[in-house]
Amino acid sequence: MILPAWFHAVNNAPDPLKPLKNQKALVTGANSGIGEACALALGAAGADIVVNYVSRPEEAERVVGLIKQSGSRALAVRADVSREDEVQAMFAQMLKEFGTIDILVNNAGLQRDARFHEMTLEQWNTVIAINLTGQFLCAREAVREFLRRGVVPEVSSAAGKIICMSSVHEVIPWGGHVNYAASKGGVMLLMKSMAQELAPKKIRVNSIAPGAIKTPINRAAWETPEAEAELLKLIPEGRVGVPEDIARTAVWLASDASDYVTGTTLFVDGGMTLYPGFATGG
Ligand code: NAD
């Protein structure tokens, strides 16, 4: 039977509730905080998800279970993102199980804080290796697959999408955390340089710069009422963010709704980068 053209048009129209249907996504550091929320949101939007983790496999399996409840496939894969061999093995496993990758969320990150004169080389190297080199290693493997496969128009108008989890500290200097701020400043130009080089191949690369989001990484900054009150002085919107604020942004950046967006950082920070002190001073 020959089906009329309208039938194909209706059948192939993107489902507004599942904008990432038939896409495969890898989220690093997806067993906690922002990465977990991104993995759940991309899964709910229709993508199959690799839940990367480095420790606490039971938390990764919990996230896998939640994604499966939304009807998407999910798989937990252990890899330290700062280790080239482990990153390559993780991508090999993903390609074997899911066939390809369409979306990478480069989320894994940590802090090792110290006053500048007391910071050890180990603290410096650990943060740069995971927050910056880890993003390079994962992006490189993803791009190799995007270039090999190219655009599949029924799946997405892009050959691939990379979302780098940066921070407001890609632009706000942060005393006591110079390793972290340097790593996120590095992520900014890693992202922009990749975006410039890869745009002709229809690969989109963007960053999300969260402000203060309630997760384990910054528990001390919001756990007590006193600490939260101090933190709120830096946030014009008057609330500390939640991981879902970031996850919603990641879904949009991964979808064709943002087809003409590449090489940009979306600040999701309740206005933290608006120099709030100048609202009353200056
Ligand atoms: P989190 O501690 O809850 O999550 C970090 C995740 O990264 C964890 O799953 C952890 O296991 C994983 N990870 C750490 N080292 C890893 C490694 N070597 N290999 C693989 N995974 C590793 O913290 P979060 O707040 O959800 O942080 C996620 C990202 O968001 C980080 O890149 C962080 O810098 C960024 N960020 C967070 C905030 C915030 O306020 N929470 C603000 C700005 C940016």
Image (cartoon, helix red, strand yellow):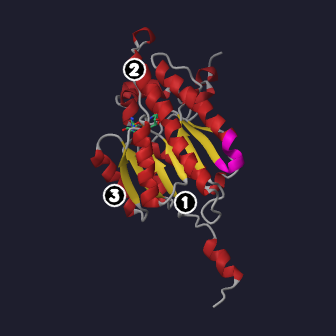
Measured as percent of width and height from the top left, residue 36 is found at: 41, 47
Q: Is residue 252 visible?
A: no
Q: Is residue 274 left or right of residue 114?
A: right
Amino acid at pointer 2: Gln
| Residue bearing the label numbered 2 | 123
Please give the range of residues in magenta: 197-203
| Residue bearing the label numbered 3 | 65
Dot 2: element = helix
Amino acid at pointer 3: Gly
Q: Is residue 4 left or right of residue 40?
A: right
State the residue at coordinates (48%, 24%).
Answer: 180
Mark 1 vs mark 3, CA separation in Å: 19 Å
| Residue bearing the label numbered 1 | 20
Along the line of sight, the residue nearer the viewer: 12 or 78: 78
Quadrant for ligand 1? top left
Q: Which mark is nearer the camera, 2 or 3?
A: 2
Say if mark 2 contacts mark 1, CB within 8 Å. no
Along the line of sight, the residue nearer the viewer: 220 or 64: 64
Local packing at callout 3 (Cα closer than 10 Å; few below 14, some 14-19, many 20+) is some
Dot 2 or dot 3: first in sequence order is 3
Dot 1: element = loop
